[in-house]
Image: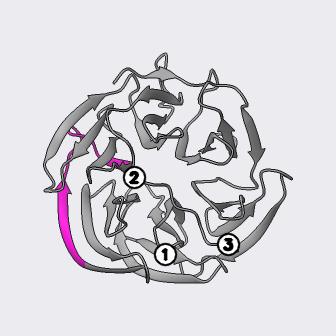
Amino acid sequence: MEFRPLLEHRCSAESPVWDDRRQCVFFVDFTQPAVRCANLDGSGHRHWPMPELASSIGLGESGRLIVAQPRSLLILDPDSGQTQLLARIVGEPADNRLNDGKVGPDGAFWVGSMDMRPARERLGSLYRVSGKGEVTLVLRQETEISNGLAWSDDGRVMYFSDSRGPWVDRFDFDPATGTMRNRVRFAELSETLGRPDGAACDVRGRYWSAGVSAGRLNVFGTDGAIEAVIPTPVAAPSMPAFCGPDLDRMVVTSLMPANPGVLDGALLIADAPVRGARVHRWRDR
C-alpha cells in the first residue's frame, strides 16, 4: 500500500470514521481539541472545537456524532455546530479518561477508558452507550489503555485490545442484543511487533491493527496469526479506517511524537487491497 498525506494539517489524530452520506471522513484532533472532517481528495476540511479532549467518535443515524470526552459523552451536530451533553461516566478512577470508542453492529456506542498515569495500572473499563444515553459497564478495570474495538462484517465477532498489555482479545458477539461471550486471547504483541492501537476489520474477517510503537499496520487472520505487515511513513500510526463509497480506500491517523518526522501527525490515505467491514451507526433516533 502506498500512503500519502490527505491533508496538510498535522496533529495527533485518532478515531477516523467514514460518513457515507456526507462522503467525508471524520476524526478527532487531540491537540486542539477538536473534531475534524475532510473529503477523500483533501477538500472540505472543517473542524469543530470541543470543550475537552475528544478521544473517539461515532456516527448517529440522525447524522449527528457521539463524542467521547474524558468523563462524559457529547452529541455534536456537524450541520449547526451545536453540542449537548448526553451522559456522564461515573465511578472511574481519578486519573482515568475515556479513550477508544466505536459504534457496534448492535447500534450502541462502545467506549473504553485508560489510566493516564505514567506508571499505569489495569484500571481501564469498557462501556456500552445506548442511543438514549444509557451507560452500561461491560468490563471493569481490565486494561491499562482500552483500545482496538472492531467487529467482523457479519457483526458476530468483536475485538478489544489493551495497548499496554499488549494483547488483543476476541469475543463472540450477538448483534441483536450486544451480548459478548466466549472471550479468548486472540494475539499478544510487543514494542517491536507494534503495540495494538486503533483497529478495523475487512470483509474477509481479518483484523487490521495500528502497531503504534512500530510504524506499521498488522493484519491478523481469523486464527490470530499476522498475515501481513504494512509499513507506514509515520512513527506512530494510531488507527486505520476503510473509507470511500465501496470501502476500498484506507485512511490512517497518526500521533505527533516529541521529535516529529516529515509526515508524523498526518492523516494518511491509500488504496486498500480489500474492502472494509460495514460502518455502523449509533441508534440515536
Seen from the viewer's position, the closer of residues 6 and 85 is 6
Q: Position of residue 77 (x, y in %)?
A: 78, 57
Q: Indicate the position of residue 279 as horizontal and vertical percent values.
A: 50, 55
Q: Residue furthest front?
A: 246
Quick one: quadrant of the N terminus? top left
- Residue 52: quadrant of the picture: bottom right
Left or right of residue 257: residue 274: left
Report the coloring of the rendering: one colour
Marks 1 and 2, the one that precedes in the sequence: 1
Which numbered disc, 2 or 3, marks the residue closer to the eye? Answer: 2
The percent coordinates of residue 90 (x first, y second) are: 59, 81
Q: Which mark is residue 284?
A: 3
Can the viewer see residue 83?
yes
Q: Which mark is residue 277?
A: 2
* Mark pair 3, 1: CA separation: 17 Å
Q: In the structure shown, which secondary structural element does the residue marked by tag 2 occupy?
A: loop
Q: Earlier in the sequence, mark 2 or mark 3?
A: 2
Q: Write down the region rendered in magenta.
A: 182-198
Q: Quadrant of the C terminus?
A: bottom right
Amino acid of disc 1:
Tyr
Q: Residues within 10 Å of mark 3 (few under 14, many from 20)?
A: some
Residue 127: image tag: 1
